[in-house]
């Protein structure tokens, strides 16, 4: 009768999933990793100050003076940390990522690639210990991105009061 049927299908796959801008992650996977001799990072906040309800947005630019190479900007590789003025940790991309998959970006020879990411203004805690945290209060914050082998970049931004 209705409602019967069998569930088939196997769950293979999973490799090569994920998205990337700037050339696609599969093309990037075959490239060598970028190194600090050739690639310079720059981090900027799209705005200096964000109104209540606006999600802060950041741009990480990798500029390459060498051959084509790749960087992993996945949440547990290029770790993003947001701290407040007292240097208290508010949020980290590795605390509770939706996916641990690599996000590979191609950085073209003598060119640059921009990776844009945003913060939902909520706190986080290691291993998803608490449900998504409280909204961040108005004030000045520091965002830090640590890309293995390429160094750490920091920039400050403000969450404006209403």
Image: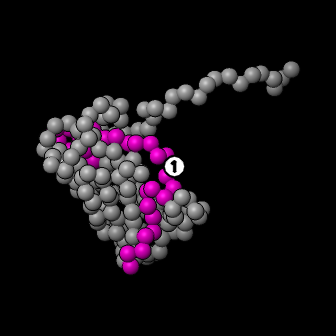
Give x and y (percent) for residue 95. 48, 58
Q: Which residues are magenta?
A: 86-114
Position of residue 28 relative to residue 148, above or below, is above
Q: Look at the image and tell me whether residue 55 can be seen.
A: no
132 or 66, which is in the foreground?
66
Q: Does residue 20 appear left or right of residue 33 in this picture?
A: right
Q: Does residue 131 appear left or right of residue 69 in this picture?
A: right
28 or 55, which is in the foreground?
28
The verdict on residue 108 being magenta is yes
Q: Residue at x 34, y 40 (%)?
A: 104
Q: Does residue 60 appear left or right of residue 100 in this picture?
A: left
Image quadrant in which you'd find residue 48: bottom left
Q: Quadrant of the N terminus?
A: top right
Image quadrant in which you'd find residue 29: top left
Image quadrant in which you'd find residue 156: bottom left
Position of residue 63 relative to residue 22, above or below, is below
Q: Look at the image and tell me whether residue 36 can be seen.
A: yes
Give x and y (percent) for residue 50. 38, 67
The verdict on residue 1 being magenta is no
In the rendered image, the residue lying farthest to the front is 149
Give x and y (percent) for residue 82. 39, 66
Q: Residue at x 49, y 46 (%)?
A: 99
Position of residue 7 relative to residue 37, above or below, is above
Q: Secondary structure at mark 1?
A: loop
Q: Does residue 59 appear left or right of residue 95 in this picture?
A: left
Position of residue 25 relative to residue 93, above or below, is above
The residue at which mark 1 appears reads as 98
151 or 45, which is in the foreground?
151
Tell me which secondary structure the magenta stretch mostly adopts: loop
Task: Categorize mark 1 by other alpha carbons within 10 Å: few (<14), some (14-19), many (20+).
Answer: few
Q: Residue at x 77, y 21 (%)?
A: 5
């Amino acid at each position: 009768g209705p409602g019967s049927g069998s569930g088939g299908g196997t769950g293979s796959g999973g490799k090569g999933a994920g998205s990337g801008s700037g050339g696609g992650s599969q093309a990037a996977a075959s490239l060598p990793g970028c190194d600090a001799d050739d690639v310079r990072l720059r981090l900027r906040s799209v705005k200096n100050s964000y109104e209540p309800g606006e999600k802060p947005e950041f741009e990480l630019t990798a500029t390459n003076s060498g051959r084509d190479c790749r960087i992993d900007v996945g949440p547990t590789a290029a770790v993003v940390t947001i701290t407040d003025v007292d240097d208290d940790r508010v949020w980290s991309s590795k605390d509770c990522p939706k996916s641990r998959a690599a996000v590979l970006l191609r950085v073209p020879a003598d060119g640059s690639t921009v990776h844009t990411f945003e913060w939902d203004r909520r706190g986080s805690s290691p291993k998803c210990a608490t449900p998504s945290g409280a909204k961040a209060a108005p004030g000045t914050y520091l965002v830090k991105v640590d890309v293995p082998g390429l160094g750490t970049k920091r920039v400050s931004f403000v969450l404006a009061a209403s």
